[in-house]
Amino acid sequence: MNQTAEKTNLLGMSLPMLQAYFQSMGEKPFRAVQVMKWIHQRGVTEFTAMTDISHSLQQKLQLVAEVKPPKIVEEFLAADGCYKWIVEVASGSRVETVFIPEADRGTLCISSQAGCTLDCSFCATGKQGFNSNLTAAEIIGQLWWANHRLGGFAPPRPHAGKTTRAVSNVVMMGMGEPLLNFDNVMASLSLMMEDNAYGLSKRRVTISTAGVVPAIDRLKDFTDASLAVSLHAPNDELRNQIVPVNRKYPIRELLRSVADYMASLPDKRVPVIEYTLISGVNDHKHLAHELAALLREFPCKINLIPFNPFAQSDYRRPSNNAVNNFRQILQEAGYTVTVRTTRGDDIGAACGQLVGEVADQTRRSERYRRAAADAQAVVPGSNRTFTSADNLAISVDSAQRSI
Ligand code: SF4
């Protein structure tokens, strides 16, 4: 056995992967369930603390494997109870994870990529270009960490009555396009919903996509998680400008593929249509009417997100009046509409305000960095300023409530 070889990180392995791993070691598959429960239900990372595993297997695992969560380099706690963690991933980049507590739920917003290739016009993450895909361990590690930090691994107290989990909902709405890191995101989703791991309901785990149609078409073979679609415009001409991936996968194709996925689910669920309202760009009343007409045959709920300005963008936040008018038109057309509210303001965790650093050197990043510097908008002491999430990262409360 080569002791200098890199150890296998078990953190990101789905149950079938872990079973295959133990089988390859000549162990019974049930060992995978035991180890999975230690890691994901009790938060244990040391094999020697896994007391229902034989001493010899503990020793064997120590030589070849590890349970290694990603490194948390900073933590912020807002006055309203929101947490933001800066996570350093293997590529050296930093991504963000945000926790939003509410009376009846706790929502964790998870990143799947450091940076993003899709360059949506309203999104600060898109401005920095793409740096790296997160590994499955780095993705599920954000949920592991939140549970670790928020007491989610503590055994339930006797006579505590109904226990509510620290993290009850997960949204893949952090940095990056989850469906462009398909395999690692699918492995992570399966752990989130696995009874021997976090056991979250499929209604409480949501993938948010800008519309990578071939990946949506594959989804049903891998998961039955809920879906949110970043639409942001009711016609291709406007959406081409706001969400450039639309030039490849136009709206009709996108809606067809989302409808197919929803139809494949055994229960009745509808997708959430995310629509970031940008002043003077896509918040006109006639566009609300156009959106209502577009979605007439498409069962869905609509979540409106007033744009949150950030340094590298000329876009402006819509007026309350514009938001209310847009909402009213959609509601009068019969849609369930929510408007996202802002949380975590004081830790820079509100939509479009999350700030981190990555080490990518893409031209796009450089271009925006220069523009920001020209505008004297770069944070002092930082070589890069960007916001995480698809500008949708936080305040997911209303989106989740509507699922
Ligand atoms: S909105 Fe999402 S998909 Fe678009 S650039 Fe931002 S992170 Fe990427």
Image: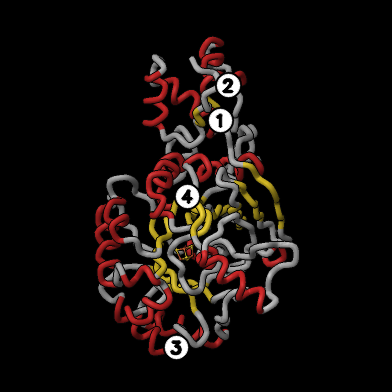
Q: Secondary structure at mark 3?
A: loop
Mark 4 to mark 2 CA distance (whole Å): 28 Å
Q: Up-down: is 328 above or below 74? A: below
Near mark 4 (Cα within 10 A), the count class, few <14, some 14-19 or many ≥20, is many
Q: Amino acid at mark 2?
A: Phe
Estimate the x, y position of residue 208 in percent, counting from the top left. 43, 59
**Amino acid at dot 4:** Asn
Looking at the rendered structure, which numbered label has been put on residue 133?
A: 4
Q: Looking at the image, is mark 1 or mark 4 nearer the viewer?
A: 4
Could you say which disc has been placed on residue 284 in the image? 3
Number of the label disc, if any, that sits on residue 167? none
Under mark 1, the amino acid is: Val
The three-letter code of the residue at mark 3 reads His
In the image, is 292 to the left or to the right of 141? left
Residue 177, quarter of the rendered image = bottom left
Viewer-side residue, 298 vs 90: 90
